[in-house]
């Protein structure tokens, strides 16, 4: 075997310019396939990045976009928000009083010192929003998210790890004007977490929270034009839309006393995503296509090269080389030349693009060899007699 | 000693549209140390016979026996590798291997060491008149006669008992042709090889120990040796 390949190599090196044919084809196709692969990975990255980071906002409003001051507030609700100056502030509203009182939170679950970010019973409405300009003071946070009749909270990641079943007990000191400060313990449900390692606080609300909230909103007598929901997981967008469409039917009676609508601002998201998706499909079609081309080219080149060398294969046959040996040499030569070209292609892409992927060139190699097998088999079956007659 | 026996051999070429009976019940026994010439009109089946003897195919009917063994039931590639050398009018050599490499290749393919193969090749090339200066030439840089010598050197190096040559001098001038034939003839004697040469050239046939004449796929005259072969009517 070694002998055969040593001689094959000797003769190949004497081929002159022809020796470049297969490596050049392999080089070109490997560069092509890896360029496509690189593009594919970039597109995929962009796609995932968009999925992960694009902020899709769903906003609840009345149908006319009117001021919501006039909307009825059916029951009490409390919101507590942190504030740079006032570590935790609690707002309490009733539909009768519309009063704002401030409380001071003394401790949270013993004295662990973890910041409680927000506690709320029912979301604020426009009244709250207009009264307090700092309601949305940290990024991504919208107090109106936290609607419901029980006390809910968004807590920091660390705190969530310490609590059981998503419920937190807090001690709050209630300072009402003209009254003595009173300590009160409240148990609240954790509906989300906030992390603030970047300086900005990022609120994370799981999808179930958002959809549960959406249902609460639908049932609540309270409406707000300011309620906005940020989707934490854009991949759930269509599921969210399904839920939202149940709660917020498209067509509302014009004279409904509580007309409201939800607008999901996702057009920009899809405008970003769609071209990426289409290009991905395109590349995904193009790559197998190149593989098919590789089979064809492998077939063609090897047929051409083998045809040229018919006489040599005839000599091999007549000096008694076994068919298997001839097949192996013919295929082995193609393999070697192809692998050299592929390696150069791989190197070129790695140097100029910094992109390295072995899988696709290997598939390419396999495809090329698949094409080459046929001609190697033909070489092995060279009919010395027929060839002699042709030459005569 | 009979080294190659053809026993009532027939051979038919089959194509889609027609069949050609190239050999029609040929029988003959070839002995070692003899120089045979096969003559006959074009299309009489000489090449076909030779290729059956070389084990490039098996007879449609009858048998080709190498020694006692039927070529139909042995490894015929091995037959050529070890026992039978074939030399054609041209195209005998690997065009991109040097004269030396053309001889050493089958030796090394058989498993001989590189250095030993080289040594043997050098001495055989020498014995057919290919000097050192030509060892590293590619066949294209050798004359037709020199190419045939290299092919003969290869046959010698592989130590085959039978050398089959199909018009080995067909492309050569008279002088070269005579030299090659002399070489083959000497081989039969000195190396005790059975040499079978197909030829159109009566001057060549005249040098043979035995002349076989073929016509329509049959050997019509064997054991000729008394009259000059050039008298045989083709
Ligand atoms: N591959 C083939 N297919 C069909 N018929 C063939 C084939 N090879 C040879 N023949 C036919 O078989 C017969 C014998 O051919 P062969 O080549 O053995 O003759 P030959 O004596 O060597 O002739 P030449 O002196 O021209 O070389 C001829 O009629 C020829 O046409
Ligand atoms: Mg012939």
Image: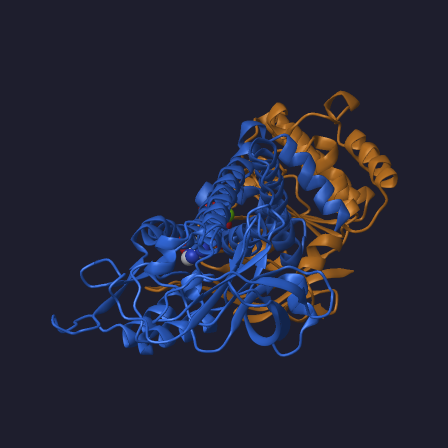
Q: Give whichever of A222, B165 is nearer the camera.
A: A222
Question: Which chain is displayed in blue in the rendered image?
Answer: A
Q: Residue at x 48, y 54 (%)?
A: A48
Q: Is residue B232 left or right of residue A289?
A: right
Q: Give the residue furthest to the top.
A: B133
> Residue A279, percent across and down?
37, 49
> Residue B216, percent across and down?
44, 58
Query: In the rendered picture of this protein, how many numbered marks are placed on residues?
Result: 0
Q: Give whichever of B82, A353 is nearer the camera.
A: A353
Is residue A329 visible in this depiction of the protein? yes
Q: Give whichever of A306, A275 is nearer the camera.
A: A275
> Residue A366, percent across and down?
56, 54
Q: Is residue B90 above or below residue A57?
A: above
Q: How is the image coloured?
A: by chain
Q: Residue at x 64, y 53 (%)?
A: A328
Q: Residue at x 48, y 78 (%)?
A: A150
Q: Is residue A98 above or below residue B111?
A: below
The answer to which image quadrant residue B135 occupies is: top right
Q: Is residue B63 left or right of residue B200?
A: right
> Residue A267, percent across and down?
29, 53
Q: Give the residue furthest to the left.
A: A254
Q: Is residue A291 left or right of residue A272?
A: right
Q: Quadrant of the N terminus of chain B?
A: bottom right
Is residue B234 visible in this depiction of the protein? no
Chain B: drawing colour:
orange
């Amino acid at each position: 075997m070694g002998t055969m390949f040593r001689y094959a190599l000797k003769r190949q090196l004497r081929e002159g310019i022809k020796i470049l044919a297969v490596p050049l084809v392999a080089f070109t196709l490997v560069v092509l396939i890896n360029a496509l692969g690189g593009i594919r990975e970039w597109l995929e990255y962009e796609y995932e990045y968009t999925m992960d980071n694009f902020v899709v906002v769903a906003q609840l409003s009345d149908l006319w976009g009117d001021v919501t001051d006039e909307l009825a507030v059916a029951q009490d609700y409390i919101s507590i928000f942190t504030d740079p100056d006032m570590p935790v502030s609690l707002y309490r509203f009733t539909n009768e009083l519309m009063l704002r009182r401030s409380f001071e939170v003394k401790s949270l679950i013993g004295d662990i010192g973890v910041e409680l970010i927000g506690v709320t019973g029912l979301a604020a409405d426009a009244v709250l929003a207009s009264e307090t300009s700092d309601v949305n003071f940290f990024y991504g946070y919208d107090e109106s998210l936290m609607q419901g009749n029980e006390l809910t909270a968004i807590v920091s990641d660390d705190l969530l790890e310490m609590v059981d079943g998503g419920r937190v007990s807090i001690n709050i000191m209630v300072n009402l004007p003209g009254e003595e400060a009173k300590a009160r313990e409240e148990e609240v449900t954790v509906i989300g977490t906030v992390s603030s390692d970047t300086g900005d606080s990022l609120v994370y609300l799981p999808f179930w929270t958002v959809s549960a909230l959406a249902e609460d909103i639908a049932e609540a007598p309270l409406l707000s034009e300011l309620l906005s929901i940020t989707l934490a997981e854009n991949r759930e967008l269509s599921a969210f839309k399904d839920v939202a469409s149940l709660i917020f039917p498209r067509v509302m009676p014009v004279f409904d006393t509580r007309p409201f609508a939800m607008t999901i601002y996702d057009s920009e998201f899809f405008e970003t995503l769609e071209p990426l998706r289409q290009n991905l499909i395109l590349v995904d079609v193009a790559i197998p296509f190149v593989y098919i081309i590789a089979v064809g080219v492998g077939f063609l080149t090897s047929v051409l090269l083998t045809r040229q060398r018919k006489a040599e294969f005839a000599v091999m046959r007549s000096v008694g080389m076994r068919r298997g040996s001839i097949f192996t040499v013919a295929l082995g030569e193609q393999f070697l030349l192809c692998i050299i070209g592929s390696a150069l292609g791989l190197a070129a892409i790695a140097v100029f693009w910094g992109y390295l992927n072995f899988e696709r060139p290997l598939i390419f190699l396999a495809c090329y060899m698949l094409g080459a097998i046929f001609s190697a088999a033909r070489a092995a079956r060279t009919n010395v007699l027929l060839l002699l007659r042709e030459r005569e | 000693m009979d080294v190659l026996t053809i026993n009532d051999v027939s051979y038919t070429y089959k194509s889609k549209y027609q069949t050609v009976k190239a050999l029609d019940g040929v029988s003959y026994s070839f002995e070692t140390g003899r120089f045979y010439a096969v003559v006959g009109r074009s299309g009489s089946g000489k090449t076909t016979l030779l290729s059956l003897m070389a084990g490039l195919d098996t007879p449609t009917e009858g048998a080709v026996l190498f020694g006692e063994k039927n070529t139909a039931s042995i490894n015929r590639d091995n037959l050529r590798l070890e026992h039978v050398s074939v030399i054609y009018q041209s195209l005998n050599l690997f065009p991109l291997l040097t004269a030396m490499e053309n001889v050493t290749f089958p030796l090394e393919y058989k498993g001989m060491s590189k250095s030993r193969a080289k040594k043997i090749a050098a001495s055989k090339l020498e014995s057919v008149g290919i000097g050192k200066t030509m060892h590293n030439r590619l066949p294209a840089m050798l004359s037709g006669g020199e190419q045939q010598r290299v092919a003969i050197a290869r046959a010698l190096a592989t130590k085959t008992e039978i050398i089959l040559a199909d018009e080995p001098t067909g492309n050569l001038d008279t002088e070269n042709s005579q030299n090659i034939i002399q070489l083959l003839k000497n081989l039969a004697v000195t190396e005790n090889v059975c040499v079978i040469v197909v030829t159109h050239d009566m001057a060549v046939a005249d040098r043979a120990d035995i002349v076989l004449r073929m016509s329509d796929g049959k050997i019509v005259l064997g054991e000729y040796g008394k009259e000059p072969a050039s008298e045989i009517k083709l």
